[in-house]
Image (spheres, grey):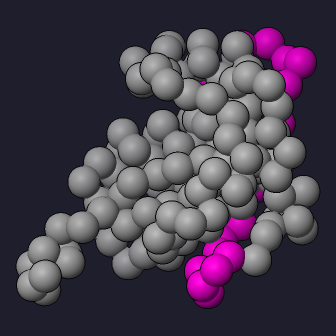
Amino acid sequence: MTDRDIMKTPKTVLVLCTGNSCRSQMAEVILNQDLAGLVRALSAGTRPQPRVADGAIAALKLAGLPTGGLYPKEIDAVMNEAIDLVVTVCDNAKESCPVFPRPVPRIHVAFHDPHGEPLESFAAVRDDIRARLIPAVREALGI
């Protein structure tokens, strides 16, 4: 692999939350959309819920973002990925973030949990993720 190939290889970012049903799912989609070609985002949960929150799906669709194939995943499902950065988006995930097979840089960018709130709350969290997480990931990865 040449230096040019390495520069073109997207960095893998794991977005970690407790339930992997809302904030981390929206962050995965937004990172993959806004940083396409630079980042390959994955998400997982320390205690995943049975399904992605309807409000998260609706908020993503309202912004014209893709929602196909989204489902909550256990952290074990991504543990063997070559992860370049772990982003925790809730305080519980930050506190219970697992130890990875190799050292991985971590950042914490917390977002409000809109579960049980109206769609407007999900949309506000979606927009907050786009406004704060994209620059934080860019800075952390130097892209």
Q: Quadrant of residue 100?
A: bottom right
Q: Is residue 47 left or right of residue 15?
A: right
Is 25 inside the magenta-drawn segment?
A: no
Q: Which sits in the foreground, 25 or 77?
A: 77
Q: Which sits in the foreground, 132 or 102?
A: 102
Residue located 89% across and 18% down the image: 116
Q: Quadrant of the C terminus?
A: bottom left
Q: Mainly helix, strand or loop, the magenta region?
A: loop
Residue located 38% across and 78% down the image: 142
- Which x, y percent locates residue 10? 30, 63
Residue located 67% across and 48% down the image: 44
Residue located 34% across and 51% down the image: 35
Which segment is the magenta one?
100-123
Q: Is residue 33 left or right of residue 78?
A: left
Q: Is residue 13 left or right of residue 86?
A: left
Please give the count of numbered marks on the rendered protein: 0
